[in-house]
Structure formats: C-alpha cells, structure tokens
Image (spheres, grey):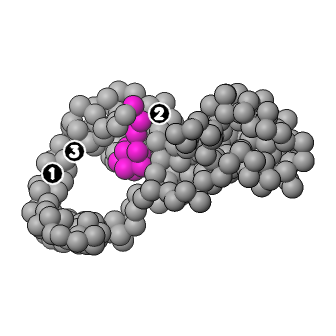
Amino acid sequence: MTMSARSFMSIGEVLGQLRPEFPDVTISKLRFLESKGVIQPERTSSGYRQFSRDDVSRLRYVLAAQRDHYLPLKVIKEHLDAIDRGLEPSTSSASAPRVPRGLSLAGGLPGPEDFLRAPSDIRLSRGELLTASGLAEDQLAQLEQYGLVTARGGFYEAEALIIAKTVQEMSRFGIEARHLRGFRSAADREIGLVEQVITPIARQRGPEAAARADETARELSALSVRLHATLVKAGLRSQIGN
C-alpha cells in the first residue's frame, strides 16, 4: 500500500516530534544519523527528505539508547538490525540477539490452529538458527540436503526454526534428516492439492480475490495438519493395540 503524501514528515516536523522528549536534538544530529544508515528517508523530486513514522520510531529508539544507556552507535545499529529481523536485541555486548520466546520454546511448536495465523516475520543467520534450535552444523546441512530447510536471501525464517527444533527433538529418538524425506514429499503433494483449489480463486477479478485465496489456503493448511495428525495417531493406536 502506497503511503499518502501527508503520511510523510519534513525534517522540521520530525524535529518538532522529537524535541519534547529529546530537547538537545538538532537537524544536524538527524542528518548525521541518516549518514550513518540509521534511517533512509525518501526524497522528493526536489531533493527534500520525507520521513515516515518508522523513521521517527527508529530515531526515538536511537536517541533513547544514547541518552539512557550510553550505548555507542555501532551497538545501537546492531540492535536495530536484530529488531528488523524480528529478534530481541541482546542486553549484553557479549550475547547474541535472541529469538522471541514464543518461537524459542520447544513446547511452543505449532498445532493446526497456528496455520490460521500469519507467520512470525523473523530472519536468522545460520549461526543464530543453530543456537536457537540446538542443531549441530552437520544436522542442519542434512536438513538442507533433503530440502527440509532452506535459506531465503541468506537468512532463515520462522518456519525453518520450527522445523529445525522439531527435528532436533526427534533426534533424541534416533531419527535423522534422511528418515524424514517422506515428510517433504508428503508436504509437496499437499501443497499441490491446495494450489489446485486456490489458483482459480486467486485468478478471479476483484480486489478481494487475493485475500480469499490466502484465507482458503490457511484453512486448508489447518485441515491438512489435523487430518495428518489424526491419521498418524489412529495408525499408531492400531499398531500398539495389536
């Protein structure tokens, strides 16, 4: 969605918003922070800066961190990078950014109802994924080899973390990535089935077509997980009962 012209602010308007909380801030300070890559305001055709609400939030974060915690700009930029990737900044210079607690708990793995919610927008480096999941490097390499986990643009998303943590838990029972190739194949077949249903919906005319297709995909995903889990449960009960 394109931001309207009045959603942008001039540098003077930004200064007016920040000065009640940070009386010492100046236009020179804002330009310095821009030169350091803290913010990247858009420019008009005449070259004037246009600041968004996100720019103001980032400036407020930087100024508060400098004033209240005396953090150097290098550390603050690391904090902002962590926030941009959906992580929680570290409270110590010796520790790495943390995965949000809801995703880092082994007990917080997804159930069918989770497919009705949008995925968490996190991006993890390879080292961060290994730390958060508990996997060893060779285990992650095997997951990638069998197509269970894939990096996008050099980072791993929330789904990769959930898969990695699930496999790490399963490894306690002697199950390895090579044993799980069938899960990938089954998932691909389910994806193909869902695509058959939603493609005609997405091709319909009207602004709501994409939203209907997305909601249908979410509902079918939830039903697919429920069906799969129930079939496995029923099959195991039958085997154990025998």
Pointer 3: residues within 10 angstroms few (<14), some, or many (20+)?
some
In reply to whether residue 162 is colored magenta, the answer given is yes
What residue sits right under mark 1 in the picture? 188
Q: Nearer the viewer, mark 1 or mark 3?
A: 1
Instruction: Estimate the x, y position of residue 185 in percent, counting from the top left.
Output: 13, 48
Magenta part of the chain: 154-166
| SS of the residue under disc 2 | loop
Task: Tell me where residue 101 sits by quadrant.
Answer: bottom right
Q: Residues within 10 Å of mark 1 (few under 14, many from 20)?
A: few
**Considering only order in the chain, which callout, 2 or 3, is on the residue closer to the N terminus?**
2
Give the side of residue 67 with respect to residue 34, left or right: right
- Residue 229, placed above or below residue 60: below
Which quarter of the figure is the N terminus placed in?
bottom left
Label 3: state its secondary structure.
helix
Amino acid type at circle 1 is Asp
Q: Dot 2, crowdedness within 10 Å: few (<14), some or many (≥20)?
A: some
Label 1: state its secondary structure.
helix
- Residue on which the image places disc 3: 180
**N-terminal label among 1 and 2:** 2
Q: Residue at x 77, y 55 (%)?
A: 17
Structural distance between the alpha carbons of marks 3 and 2: 24 Å
**Residue 111 picture location, percent across and down:** 36, 66
- Circle nearer the N terminus (1, 3): 3
| Residue type pointed to by label 3 | Leu
Residue 125 circle label? 2
Residue at (28% x, 34% y) in the render: 144
Of badges 3 and 2, nearer the viewer stands 2
Indicate the quadrant where residue 43 lies: top right
The residue depicted at 18 percent of the width and 43 percent of the height is 181
Q: Position of residue 178 (x, y in %)?
A: 21, 37
